[in-house]
Image (cartoon, rainbow, N blue to C red):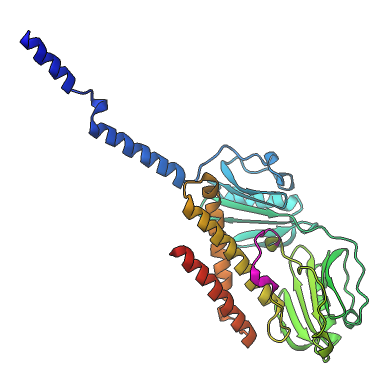
Amino acid sequence: MEKETVKSNEVKTNKPFYKKWWFIAIIVAVVLIVIALFIGLPKKEKKLDLSTTNLGYYLPELPAKKGKINYDSNSSLDLTLYDVTKAEYNDYIKKCEEKGFNIDVTSDSSFEAFNENGDRIYMYFSDKTNLKISFSVARKLEKITWPTSELANTLPIPEFDGGYISTDTSNEISITLGHVSKENYDKYVNECSAKGYNKNYKKSNKHYTADNDQGNHLELSYYGGQRMNISLESTSSDSSSSTPTTTEPPKTNEQENQTTSSSSSTTSTSSNGLSKEFKDAMDSYESFMNEYIDFMKKYQANSTDLSLLNQYATIMQKYSEQVEAFDEWESEDMSTEEAKYYIDVQTRVNKKLLDIAQ
């Protein structure tokens, strides 16, 4: 009887191996590692099907590769394809050109091109084998009539087919014109110069700024996709007292896709030293940084949110591009007003970055 009792007690104290603490600890550790890998690594989905996206019909059929959709809306599409070879990349470039993306083509370390509607495709390798494809739809052109104000009459009338007018007052004009080739843009720059807009000029491949004898300030920009912007402002003394109501200036494809606006974008543009190109670049940078900071706050609050994790790689790529573009201005010759605006933007952004870091 006593022996049976001892045997019974031994059975109770010898737990099965799967109930022992060390085994449970190992299982918990394995589960945590699997979860960490699942969250931290990009999930390679099945072959991407463009027919399931809003804008996929604009693009040629993708290589038979796995990948993921980073962003999909009615105005832009962002994809990542995994394990793409250089040969497949070059073949897809040819398909894009055959599909109509053969305007203003640039192809070196990346590929950028536009179609006749001004829609833009941009591709690059985010690492050795993962191909990023971004596509954005351009704003539709409208039938417009060239302005008839006294200010507008100081300019030659360019060749164009459609566009949109953002501002048309006696003191300011901002117009985007469509179906303007790069050659016609260069021709128009020369025509404006010949008509008197050749004082204090600055000229680059796709941008021209100059004043005339009356002090009017002209800025011309070639966006790509056969689109040109004309911005003209009167700096005469009587214009300072007027406060015309205007709409936002026209934006590039990238800027149109940004939904978060910067509070500094309403700062008035000075025609004496603060060029529109510079201010647009600064405001675009600050606008994105506000978007980036909002994202990081959400990410810090819930770093396991899969929807945020899916956006993380894309927004970090954009962050790197924006910072690089912003830093390039340090080496440029800036006027006193531009240098002050540059420092103001940098100070505001750095303060917000410091806040989320703390």
Q: Is residue 335 visible?
A: no
Q: Does the magenta stretch include residue 263?
A: yes
Residue displayed at 59% across by 78% down: 342
The magenta region covers 256-266
Indicate whether 12 appears above or below 29: above
Which of the 4 quarters of the picture holds residue 331? bottom right
Lateral position of residue 10 relative to residue 137, left or right: left
Residue displayed at 72% across by 49% down: 74
Residue displayed at 48% across by 53% down: 301
Please provide percent x and percent y for residue 325. 58, 70
Q: Which of 246 and 249 is in front in this view?
A: 246
Please provide percent x and percent y for residue 283. 65, 71
Indicate whether 82 appears above or below 219: above
Q: Residue furthest left?
A: 2
Q: Quadrant of the N terminus?
A: top left
Q: Nearer the viewer, residue 353 or 112?
A: 353
Please provide percent x and percent y for residue 25. 28, 36
Which of the 4 quarters of the picture holds residue 109? bottom right
Please provide percent x and percent y for residue 115. 77, 56
Indicate whether 132 appears above or below 169: above
Q: Is residue 111 visible?
A: yes
Q: Which residue lies furthest to the bottom in this view?
A: 213
Q: Is residue 228 magenta?
A: no
Q: Quadrant of the C terminus?
A: bottom left
Lateral position of residue 5 relative to residue 321, left or right: left
